[in-house]
Amino acid sequence: MRTRINLLTTTAAILLAMTATALAKPEPKPAKPTQADQAKQAEKLYQQGRDALLTGEYDKAVTLLTKAVSADKVGKTSYRLALARAYRYADRIAPAAKELATILKTAPDHVEAGQLLGEIYIAEEDWAKAAAVLTPLLKYRHDYTTYHMLAEATYNLDKYPEARKYFEKAVQLNPDSAADHYQLGNIYLAGHFYSLAAESYQKALSRGIESPVLRYKLGSAYFNLRNYFGRVQVVTVKAGKTGTISENWYLIEPVPGKTDTFRAAPSNSAIFQIAKATTDGIANRPDIQFLKANIYLNARRYKQAYAMFGKIKETIPKEDKALYYFYYSQAAFGIDKYDEYLSLLDEAIALDKAAYKPTLVEAYLKVAEQYNQLGQADKYIHYLARAVAASPQTVSLHLKLGYAYEQARKYNLAAKQWQLVLDLQNDHPQRLKLINLITKYKNIPAEKDPKTKATG
């Protein structure tokens, strides 16, 4: 019995010792994840983050994709690009830009990252940064997106030659882009390439852009091409009204003696486009009414132009007043209102002497010639004398006035003007002729008409 107890005791001791030994032995360390395991985990996080991004869970996508980027030891740009997109969709623009900039530091040929960063800068209207990011991308890919954004950036930086080049390339790659055609039209118009501007605006219209401002700019291009009314035709429009649009025609005026029949301007004319802009909502703008009056003026429809200028007088801004009075004066001249013509021109000169004072002599000569054709010698001489007074150093004016006096039989006054010609230009081509005329008339007494003295 005692032997059995000892045996049990010995066995228990052995088991106790084995247990203690087992407890004292440290557990084996977990195996370190291999590079393949890390890549697998990063890919799993990326796929989960991408799914969250595509389902609109942007904050969740940011969390998962941040972990994916951290777990990735290879430096996959696709993970960081997805993270940048997640940040952007979550309206966290600064970290999005930071991720994209990081991609471009290590992979400057990553066009998608550069374009996305360019979009961010453009949305923030940071045109300089956008141009700086986008320009290098052309080394690696010539696609529409890059050209379009570069064009927009350089246009807003007022670098018009560069913007023109980029927009032209953009419309080559994407000819259906109405917005690019419109902006290209703006560049052409600003550069005075009116034919190209008109073509671009027409393309923008045909591709779906419809706005009064576009119509106004197209009208301006046609105006500068001197396409005021285009090829006027006679059309029939029931219950038509002068000065309105009917389909693709602008109704200029009724044809006398014919019902519902009008002379009409086609759509590819300045007046049609300006009238269309007016109809579509910018009728009250002074500049468009001013341009409309000028269209009529340059088309030599002086009566209508004169009436239009008269109506808009109070709406013209201060900076355009001088130009307004100048054009208004031309309309007055066109309907034989010569005194008003000169009066309006004086208004223009008072506002901008440098620009319009040089036109005064020509104005006097124009009025003088009109009276000469009407056979009104006194007024002819009167306005020639005013031209001489405005430019007393001009030899040709003294010569012309001398002949006018001779024609009116005011010989003494004629001789004085010819003598002034020789005083101003001793070697005048008509020197001998003038000497003979002066000699011929010098002994003829001057007329005692007070009007003649005042004029002379």
Image (tube, rainbow, N blue to C red):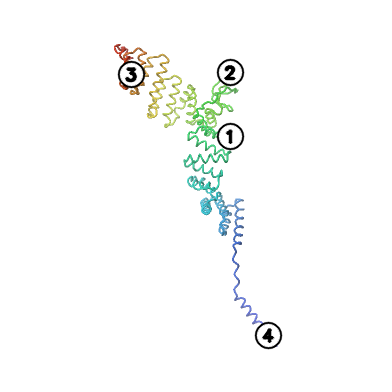
Q: Which mark is residue 258?
A: 2
Q: Amino acid at mark 1?
A: Ser
Residue drawn at 67 percent across, 82 percent down: 11
Q: Nearer the viewer, mark 3 or mark 2?
A: 3
* Three-letter code, disc 2: Lys
Whether label 3 touches label 4, CB < 8 Å:
no
Q: Residue furthest right?
A: 1
Q: Position of residue 211 (x, y in %)?
A: 54, 34
Residue, disc 1: 206
Q: Quadrant of residue 232?
A: top right
Quadrant location of the C terminus in the rendered image: top left
- Whole-angstrom CA distance, mark 3 to mark 4, is 161 Å
For label 4, the SS is helix
- Could you say whether the residue bearing mark 1 is in a helix, strand or loop? helix
Q: CA distance from mark 1 to mark 4?
A: 108 Å
Going by the numbered disc 4, the residue's amino acid type is Leu
Which of the numbered marks, if any, corresponds to residue 7?
Answer: 4
Give the spatial CA distance, label 1 vs label 3. Answer: 66 Å
Q: Residues within 10 Å of mark 3 (few under 14, many from 20)?
A: some
Depth check: give the residue in front, 23 or 417.
417
- Graded by Cα atoms within 10 Å as few (under 14), some (14 to 19) or many (20 or more), the crowding at tag 2 reads few
Instruction: Please report whichever mark, 3 or 4, sits nearer to the chain's N-terminal start.
Output: 4
State which tag comes first along the sequence, 1 or 4: 4
The residue tagged with tag 2: helix, strand or loop? loop
Kind of residue at badge 3 = Arg
